[in-house]
Image (tube, grey):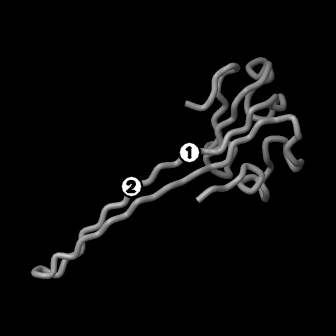
Amino acid sequence: MARSLTYITFDVPGIVPYQALQENVETTPEAYAQLSADYHIESINLTVAATFGLLFPATYKGVVPSGQFAPATTLQGEHVVVVQGTDSGSDWDILPAGEGRP
């Protein structure tokens, strides 16, 4: 599954509240892969299953508007915002200036 950053933030106040992303910012989409397997043990009528998933969150790289996520003194320069959901308060992380997604 893949979702673009504009899709994830469509119905919520986004990076810039209620505005589209600027054209000069870099974004990466969210990518998710999942692998599942199950095995049925007929003699005891039991099915055992395992699921493994890997998520690469969406990112925004650009100037973060002051006052949006933290005091303006900590947001000078370009930052990478890692977006893991639609809630900007708990699902988004701002990396220090100059750092990229690990």
Q: Within 10 Å of the Cα at label 2, are there few (<14), some (14-19), or many (20+) other Cα atoms?
A: few
Taking the spot 75% from the left edge, 52% from the top edge, the residue there is 9
Residue type for callout 2? Phe
Quarter of the rendering containing residue 68:
top right
Taking the spot 67% from the left edge, 48% from the top edge, the residue there is 29
Tell which residue pokes out farthest to the left in this image: 43
Q: Is residue 11 left or right of residue 86?
A: right
Q: Which residue is mark 1?
A: 56
Taking the spot 63% from the left edge, 56% from the top edge, the residue there is 2
Indicate whether 31 appears above or below 94: below
Dot label at residue 66: none
Q: Within 10 Å of the Cα at label 1, are there few (<14), some (14-19), or many (20+) other Cα atoms?
A: some
> Mark 2 to mark 1: distance in Å?
14 Å
Q: Quadrant of the N terminus?
A: bottom right
Secondary structure of the residue carrying numbered label 2: strand
Position of residue 10 measured from the top left corner of the image (x, y, whole percent)? 79, 57
Q: Is residue 92 left or right of residue 45?
A: right
Quarter of the rendering containing residue 67:
top right
Q: Which residue is mark 2?
A: 52
